[in-house]
Image (cartoon, grey):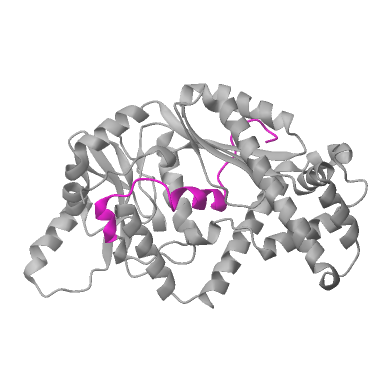
Amino acid sequence: MSTSKQADASDQAADAPKEPRTTGVYVYGIVPTDMRTEDDAVGIDDSRVSTVRHGDIAALVSEISVDRPIGKPADLQAHAHLLDGVARVAPVLPLRFGAVLTDTDAVKDELLTAHADEFAAAMEQLEGKAQYVVKARYVEHAILWEVIGENERASALRDTIRDQPEAATRDARMALGEIVANAIVAKREEDTATVVEALDSLADSVNVREPTHEEDAAQVAVLVEVARQDELEQAVGALAERWDGRVEMRLLGPLAAYDFVLSPTPEG
Amino acid sequence: MTTGGPSSSSLADVIDTILDKGLVIDAYVRVSLVGIELLTIDARIVVASVDTYLRFAEAVNRLEIGSEPKGLADLAGGGTEDAESKTQGALGAAGEKLGDLLGGGQEEPQRERVSRESTRGDK
């Protein structure tokens, strides 16, 4: 591999006065060693993706310039796109965004060799499976009507503030807003449980995510056999139909199993 | 979900997934080689606040007679686009909030945050 040759060369030059390093090795994830990267597989900055191998496992990497910060939308998308593409065809342990090592030797020694057994075992468990994420978001006016319909005080407060300037009705608005916010929290809990229940029999593992938006109804990640994707779609579709007009549902996947890889716990 | 098949991930979906999930390894400390700009996890945490309350109240105030659930059939159609624009809206809001917190986008506090995050992950 051309990248490792470059790394060797830079190691030999280690005695020379230190120049600021301008490139590093970005690591996307861990895959089985027989996984081949397509020639046109690209990562961050459209750089070519290759593998660094060690026994049965390999790291998906690309060279990256370290003199600019990463984290632009395109960088995030590139990381996810590559890993999700791989997840369709092979087990992959996704790394959290932003892992950069100094060179391919560091990838081999510090990452692969140090964790070879854990990685191999984890990959075995992911064989044939992928992550899917169900995202449910309340349709705002529908959920607001629901809250007002269920809560007399909210309904009364609505009449109080109706068409009144904000400054004159601030207390009533605060009270109303708090009722709505609390009601949505309670509904979220209930509806998340419903989603989990609907997917439980299909999923090997379930991870309920924290809400990232105040009108989230549920965010649930599941690890499912790719062969059962149809069943998953049907289960989510049935919920979407049941909640039509009230909750907007989306199903993302197949994705790399971000929610289901456990980080090795270093001693201390 | 209008088509039945899985939808593709928006930027907001990607952020929800790859910034605080996935393997973190001890070698990950090396991330200090780079700075991650802009988006941090802190900005996404949902905290009920005065702003939230006032926004909900105003949304209730704007509810129009006739848009009650019974009349929802018309509105159910434009699902996907709706969701998409809301997602982007949420992301935009997170960005704005972050900007406020940092008093304009200097890089230092962001870098500090990122390294703190990785430290926690390594523990």
Left or right of A45 in this view: A229:
right
Q: Residue at x 44, y 50 (%)?
A: B18
Where residue A175 sits, quadrant-wise, is bottom right
Give whichever of B8, B61 is nearer the camera: B61
- Residue A88, magenta (yes or no): no
Left or right of A209 in this view: A237:
right
| Residue B5 visible | no
Left or right of A131 in this view: A165:
right
Q: Residue at x 39, y 53 (%)?
A: A97
Span colored in magenta: B1-30
Give whichever of B45, A45 is nearer the camera: B45
Left or right of B89 in this view: B103:
left
- Residue B28, magenta (yes or no): yes
Where residue A57 sits, quadrant-wise, is top left
Q: Residue at x 54, y 57 (%)?
A: B44
* Residue A34 x/y as whole percent: 26, 32
A97 versus A163 height, above or below: above
* Residue B58 x/y as whole percent: 80, 61
Where residue B68 sits, quadrant-wise, is top right
Q: Residue at x 58, y 55 (%)?
A: B46
* Rendered-image quadrant of the N terminus of chain B: top right
A107 versus A246 height, above or below: below
